[in-house]
Image (spheres, rainbow, N blue to C red):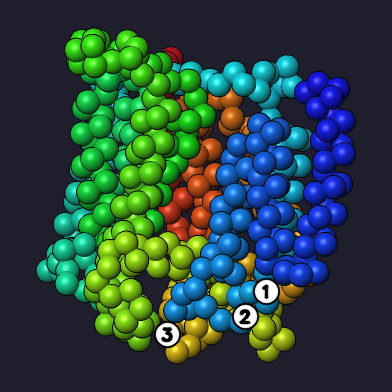
Amino acid sequence: MTGAERRLWSVGIPVVAGALLLLATRNVGVAITIGLAVGALLAARCRMWALAACAAAWSAAFLAVWALPGPYDSWAGTAVLPVLAGYVTVFLVAWSVGRRVTGPSSTVVASARPSLSWPSERRLLTYLFVLLGIAAVTAAVRYRGVLPPLLADNPDAARQVLRQQSNIVIGLLSEAWTLGMAISLLRALSGTLRGSLIFYALAGVFTVGAALGASKNSVLVGVAPALITALSVRRPPWRMARLLPTRLLPTKSVSKTTVVLLIGAVALGAAVYLGGQRTLAGTGTFETEFRSRYGNNALASSAGSLDLSLSSSTETFGRLWSQREHLDPAYGAYSLTFLGSRVQPLVGEVDLYGVTSQLSQPYFMNTATFAAIPLLDYGPVGALFFFAALGLAVGASERWFEFSTAPAEQLGRGFIVYFALFGIYELYPLIYPTWLSLVPGLWILHRLGRPAT
């Protein structure tokens, strides 16, 4: 950064801060949203791309709360924006601090992205087919006698039946779909076009298997980390001259960044669209209101689905915050939700979704939030320390893996970033035990890439 740029930033930041404070006296929601957008720009200027993306996601979530009307909106959502923004700010600032105190030597050039060093193709394909076998057997056990929710007339009802029949072992083994999807897609994006066709095919198979449960996140949790990782490492351009006539190509190579962004846009668009269709197919009170508002308009229902994904977490947290004085601290019981009912005899019986569904009356929606678990466990002040520690952990681990050449470590970073971005909806790692399968799976991938001794 030149001296002129430093002077511009030193003057611009106080001016922007003052303008935001003035705007907050008129509309606090607008001021908070713009403030997070400015924070995203500052993080991007400092080459903290993952942190910038998280700040931008929160800006979009707050925009959906105060600007986009929806059937789940209430006074509580807009009223709680300053409180939730405070927790989010603590988390993001701690993330930045964690990056600065941890990671590779400062001599590493920030713009020098690493090149991945993969295991041999034979080893990698063997591992992927083993994962596919585990996933297929688990799906056969899971859907035995039950139509997969993706193919059911009412996906939500089918998912509820499966949830009652499933257990933590089946759930953890089902993450073979996720792991296989992430590995095969990243390998396809980091190789030559002709050599990557089999990995694209495997990525498609794993994606279809993950989608059988009719959960948007079951697909995104595999696709998004692979795309995040692909944007963070070096990707040699595809040589297209042999595949298309030269006259159709402005150059002889094409950047994979466009392909990565296109895959991400398609995945997100498909998730939003299918989410809207799933809600339209439901039979509950909220689904009835959703249909009356959006009807059979695919575009309107998709927009409503996107608004619900962005704003429902904040809306639910607003209801929770307004009744916080009537809730006793659980001192860690909610933080162990991902372990299921087996640990409840030790830490006490709690039901996060039971609490949030009661707060969402008259709809009784099972919607968790980013800040619900620390608030219910440790109270308003304890939640501040929780998010400071969480931000430090995310920043330190994200920075630690940033320049690694190991695909497993880069994918681990991708999952960490995705879970942080998913905070606009809920605190994913403390609710679902997904990472209990992903960590050993990535460790095996790491071992496969090491030379035999």
In the rendered structure, the answer to whether residue 249 lies left or right of residue 337 reads left
Q: CA distance from mark 2 to mark 3?
A: 15 Å
Question: Residue 80 — which label?
Answer: 1
State the residue position of label 2. 76
Q: Upstream in the sequence, badge 1 or badge 3?
A: 1
Res 343 visible: no
Image quarter where the C terminus lies is top left
Is disc 2 in contact with disc 1, using a CB cutoff of under 8 Å?
yes
Q: Position of residue 134 (x, y in %)?
A: 24, 46
Q: Single out the mark in the foreground, 2 or 3.
A: 2
Question: Residue 310 — which label?
Answer: none
Q: Amino acid at mark 2?
A: Ala
Q: Residue at x 28, y 75 (%)?
A: 295
In the rendered structure, the answer to whether residue 314 lies left or right of residue 31 reads left
Q: Residue at x 33, y 45 (%)?
A: 266
315 up-or-down from 63: above or below = below
Q: CA distance from mark 2 to mark 1?
A: 6 Å
Q: Secondary structure beneath disc 3?
A: loop
